[in-house]
Image (cartoon, rainbow, N blue to C red):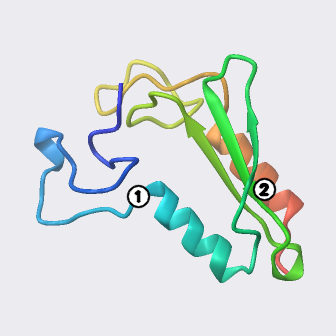
Amino acid sequence: MIDNHVPYYGGQPTAENAKGAYSYLSVNESVLFWAEHDNCSSTPQTETSASENIIVDTYTGGDNDTEVILYSIVDGGHAWPGGEKGSEAADEPTDEISATDLIWEFFVNHPKK
């Protein structure tokens, strides 16, 4: 399964209800923009889950201890990780991680200075 609404590798969506005259940057281009903007290392520390379905790239060493963290879901579709299953508007989400919990944890660990 792939996300055909917001393509991971960039470009135009292929979903019938998402086609338009726009194009997305790849996830890699977007993450590298923020890592560079925050003066983080350009080479991430990479961890892979035991199931090998979740890859976490962490760009560290940024200004004021900033870091950029990317969670990639192998063969992930257009769904909120840890979200409700069975939604007609989305693909089946993984239950291996919760995007809501990860975002909250990030903000707790990186308070505004």
Q: Quadrant of residue 58?
A: bottom right
Q: Is residue 112 left or right of residue 57?
A: right
- Residue at 12% across, 59% down: 20
Position of the N terminus by quadrant: top left
Query: Mark 1 falls on what kind of element?
Result: loop
Front-most of residues 41 and 11: 41
Q: Quadrant of residue 95?
A: top right
Cα gap from disc 2 to disc 1, whole angstroms:
22 Å
Q: Is residue 70 left or right of residue 10?
A: right
Query: Mark 2 falls on what kind of element?
Result: helix
- Residue at 22% across, 49% down: 13
How far across and down, in percent of the image, does residue 25 sit? 37, 64
Front-most of residues 33 and 85: 33
Relative to 36, residue 96 above or below: above
Per the rendering, the mark at residue 26 is: 1
Q: Which residue is mark 2?
A: 106
